[in-house]
Image (cartoon, rainbow, N blue to C red):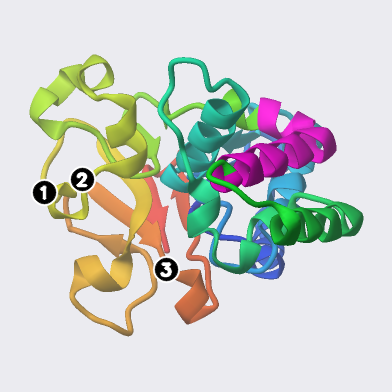
């Protein structure tokens, strides 16, 4: 059996309940499709939980993909820690109330950062704040950042593509080389694929309430052909849909 989940967005307790249910013995495996951080209250703890889970069971049994929220977070880390020749990135400004940042540093670091923020002055204030924040995260969770940087953009089988947002479907069977990385994690909502494709596509990223046109729908959405979407908008619904694939029967269960 293959189990797929996506978009936990810092809702660790809900993710844990989901992960505890599947049978991960034998050749069974779990595929996580990205967006582990932001919105919910436990982004850092969610990353640590998934990191430990993969270390415990192995990367072939717990397959972890990156989403657009991890991509944006890493872009910030990379541009601030290696700024030469790279445009400035102010991800911290979009982290309302330091919602994600505060989960990736210690309580002492957070208080130090708040003092630094209150005392800092001058035109370079924003730059200095971002540099300080990145420095603290790397000091406390450097191992998580190294791990995040290695997360793949997709996982494929003979008949399936597991991906956060989607692929360039106009490329057809050449999707693997024809899809840029930003599409794998951030394919625009108005270009989300529907209909027949040469492989099944299992993705998160877009709320199933949006793609179904039903505001109260937060389950797995199947278009009746090649696409399965599994982002249940956990912040609204309190649930993370699980898509199960039975390799023996070739059937999806949800």
Q: Are marks 2 and 1 in contact (CB under 8 Å)?
A: yes
- Toward the viewer: 180 or 50? 180
First reached walking from the N terminus: tag 2 or tag 1: 1
First reached walking from the N terminus: tag 3 or tag 1: 1
Is the N terminus in the top left, top right, bottom left or bottom right quadrant? top right
**Number of other residues with Cα within 10 Å of mark 2, as a class: few under 14, some 14 to 19, many 20 or more:** some
Q: Name above or below for residue 19 compared with residue 24.
A: below
Label 3 belongs to which residue? 232
Label 1 belongs to which residue? 195
In terms of secondary structure, where does tag 2 sit? loop
Spatial CA span between label 2 and label 1: 6 Å
Spatial CA span between label 2 and label 3: 19 Å
Question: Bounds of the magenta span?
Answer: 125-146
Label 2 belongs to which residue? 226
Tell whether position 142 is magenta.
Answer: yes
- Toward the viewer: 86 or 173? 86
Q: Are marks 2 and 3 in contact (CB under 8 Å)?
A: no
Q: How many marks?
A: 3
**Number of other residues with Cα within 10 Å of mark 1, as a class: few under 14, some 14 to 19, many 20 or more:** few
Q: Are marks 3 and 1 in contact (CB under 8 Å)?
A: no
Spatial CA span between label 3 and label 1: 20 Å
User: Is 4 placed left or right of 164 in the picture?
Assistant: right
In terms of secondary structure, where does tag 1 sit? loop
In terms of secondary structure, where does tag 3 sit? loop
Mark yes or no: residue 66 visible: no
Q: Give the residue drawn at x 43%, y 70%.
A: 233
């Amino acid at each position: 059996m293959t189990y797929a989940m996506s978009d936990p967005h810092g809702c660790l307790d809900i993710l844990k309940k989901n992960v505890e249910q599947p049978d991960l013995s034998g050749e069974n495996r779990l595929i996580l499709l990205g967006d582990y951080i932001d919105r919910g209250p436990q982004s850092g703890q969610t990353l640590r939980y998934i990191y430990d889970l993969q270390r415990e069971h192995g990367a072939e049994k717990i397959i972890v993909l990156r989403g657009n929220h991890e991509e944006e977070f890493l872009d910030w880390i990379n541009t601030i820690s290696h700024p030469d020749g790279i445009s400035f990135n102010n991800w911290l400004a979009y982290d309302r109330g330091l919602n994600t940042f505060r989960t990736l540093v210690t309580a002492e670091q957070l208080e130090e950062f708040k003092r630094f923020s209150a005392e800092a002055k001058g035109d370079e204030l924003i730059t200095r704040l971002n540099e300080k924040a990145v420095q603290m995260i790397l000091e406390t969770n450097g191992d998580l950042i190294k791990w995040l940087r290695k997360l793949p953009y997709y996982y494929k089988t003979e008949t399936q593509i597991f991906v956060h947002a989607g692929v360039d479907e106009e490329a057809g069977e050449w999707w693997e080389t024809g899809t840029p990385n930003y599409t794998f994690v951030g394919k625009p909502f108005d270009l989300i694929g529907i209909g027949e494709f040469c492989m099944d596509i299992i993705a998160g990223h877009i709320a199933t309430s949006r793609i179904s046109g039903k505001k109260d729908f937060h389950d797995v959405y199947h278009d009746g052909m090649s696409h399965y979407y599994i982002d249940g908008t956990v912040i609204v619904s309190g649930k993370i849909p699980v898509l199960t694939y039975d390799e023996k029967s070739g059937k999806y269960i949800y």
